Image: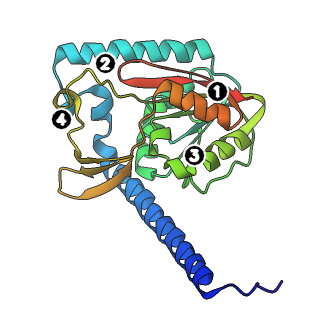
Amino acid sequence: MCRPILPPDQEHRDVTADENRETVLVEEEELVADQVAYYRARAPIYDQWWQRSGAYDRGPEMHGEWNRQLDQVEEELRAFSVRGNVLELAGGTGWWTERLAQSADQLTVVDSSPEVLEINRKRTARVDVEYIVADLFAWMPTSRYDVVFFSFWLSHVPRQRCTAFWSMVQSCLAPGGRVFLIDNHSDPDIPESDFQDPYVIHYEPDRHIRRLDDGREYRVVKVMYEPDELARQLTDLGWAADIKATRWFLYGAAHPG
């Protein structure tokens, strides 16, 4: 098909727009690559965050509150009843994989970091779990699953990729399939100094600059959702969702509407 002849100013605007879109895509790819590199490098100390140890230790009172909220999320996951053929996206070091493995008939875990999956494999200690090292922004399923689970991953998906991500999730589901998600939630009543991530050196809209103990710095996507905001987004994408939050955790279930 022949390209129509455009006025010079219109052609210039189109070229500029194309160049701007290409620049944004390149920057986004670099940001995502930086994020992958960060979590690979941080794998040996990642569990300090879960255990509220090391640099994350805020004392027994804060630790106790963390565990109480975590118990609430775990109770919701038990009530959700994970069963059948289960897929975990961004399985990380296996804190939640260990729990999924207790009731799943089959379990597949995907993550971009071989380092965290090695920790996951040792923690889960279930020999029939299938582990896949893959870029979750490029990976596509070859099976269908009764449950798709992901924790602390949605906040690392750039907003402009959310539609594609949820489309991929839907493609993973068998008829009647369900999703359970867990993520961070900000508590505005807690002073930032009391709960700030010690590895974040700069906060930007929807992203962090983080520095490891060896001085290396990385950019990481970090999109914080409120329950109503995420529920509306999922409704707009054709999902039915029940999203809740504690002070520090966002969680809930969804299925195609």
Give the amino acid type for the residue marked by disc 2 in the picture: Trp
Above or below, 195 relative to 24: above
Which of label 4 and label 1 is nearer to you? 1
Mark closest to the chain's N terminus, 3 or 4:
4
Mark closest to the chain's N terminus, 3 or 2:
2
Task: Say which residue appears at 75% left-offset and 39% top-offset.
Answer: 144
Q: Which residue is mark 3?
A: 162
State how far apart marks 4 and 2 are (Cα).
15 Å
State how far apart marks 1 and 2 are (Cα).
25 Å
Q: Which residue is mark 2?
A: 66
Quadrant placement of the C terminus = top right
Residue 71: x percent and y percent?
Answer: 41, 13
State how far apart marks 4 and 1 are (Cα).
34 Å
Which of label 1 and label 2 is nearer to you? 1
Q: Which disc is residue 254 wearing?
A: 1
Task: Say which residue appears at 62% left-offset and 33% top-offset.
Answer: 234
Mark closest to the chain's N terminus, 4 or 2:
4
The secondary element bearing badge 4 is classed as helix
Q: How many marks?
A: 4
State how far apart marks 3 and 2 are (Cα).
28 Å
Q: Is residue 153 visible?
A: no
Which of label 3 and label 2 is nearer to you? 3
Task: Say which residue appears at 41% left-offset and 41% top-offset.
Answer: 119
Quadrant placement of the N terminus = bottom right
| Drawn side of residue 222 relative to residue 103, left or right | left
Which of label 3 and label 4 is nearer to you? 3
The secondary element bearing badge 1 is classed as strand
Q: Residues within 10 Å of mark 3 (few under 14, many from 20)?
A: some
Q: Which disc is residue 55 wearing?
A: 4
